[in-house]
Image (cartoon, grey):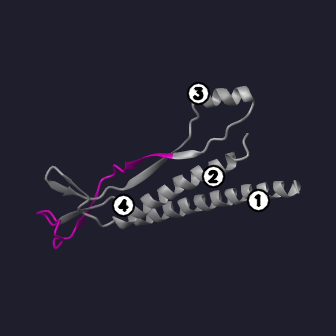
Amino acid sequence: MKLTNGFNVSASALTAQRLRMDVISSNIANAETTRGKFVNGQYEPYKRKMVVIEPIQPSFSDVLNAQISGSERAAGVKATRIIEDSSPSKLVYNPSHPDADEAGYVKLPNVDVMKEMVDMISATRSYEANVTALNATKAMFVKALEIGK
């Protein structure tokens, strides 16, 4: 196992969690956006977006080289794609809204701000945990270098 694998794993997780926080921030910012997309001559409300995070799958050559050298390869994570939530939009009665239909209902985005805040706290905690792991790895390197003095 390489000495820098811990850094690589933490760095991949930090990158994925930062993207997750960016997407959550975008969802909160667009929680009231009624004109998200223009489809078939009509505006549709903004759709909530979510990040899909998956473990990095090593290639065949990576696994073969690790087996030949007898080393173990640590894998991190990566954000593979951003998907839209398919849950229905909220209908709110507000006849004075410019995007209200003939009956006075407005389609609002399917963004629940409370759910987004919970996801943001989860992403923040995960980010902090990876920073702690990164700092612990760095401290181990410093101690190892002090042994050599």
Dominant secondary-structure state across the stretch colored magenta = loop
Mark 1 or 2, nearer chain start: 2
Picture coordinates of residue 117 (x, y %)?
A: 47, 65
Amino acid type, residue under disc 4 in the picture: Val
Q: Is residue 149 magenta?
A: no
Q: Along the line of sight, which residue is nearer the eye, 89 or 134?
A: 134
Tell me the quadrant of the picture where the C terminus can be found: bottom right
Amino acid type, residue under disc 1 in the picture: Ala
- Which is closer to the viewer, label 2 or label 4? 2
Cα–Cα span, label 2 and label 4: 30 Å
**Residue drawn at 25 percent across, 63 percent down:** 34
Q: Residues within 10 Å of mark 2 (few under 14, many from 20)?
A: many
The kind of secondary structure element at disc 3 is: helix
Q: Which residue bears the numbered disc 3?
A: 60
What's the mark number on residue 17? Answer: none
Q: Along the line of sight, which residue is nearer the eye, 132 or 98?
A: 132
Q: Residues within 10 Å of mark 1 (few under 14, many from 20)?
A: few
What's the mark number on residue 139? Answer: 1
Mark 2 or 4, nearer chain start: 2
Tell me the quadrant of the picture where the N terminus can be found: top right
The kind of secondary structure element at disc 1 is: helix
| Residue 112 in view in this figure | no
The kind of secondary structure element at disc 2 is: helix
Q: Along the line of sight, which residue is nearer the eye, 38 or 107?
A: 38
Cα–Cα span, label 1 and label 3: 33 Å
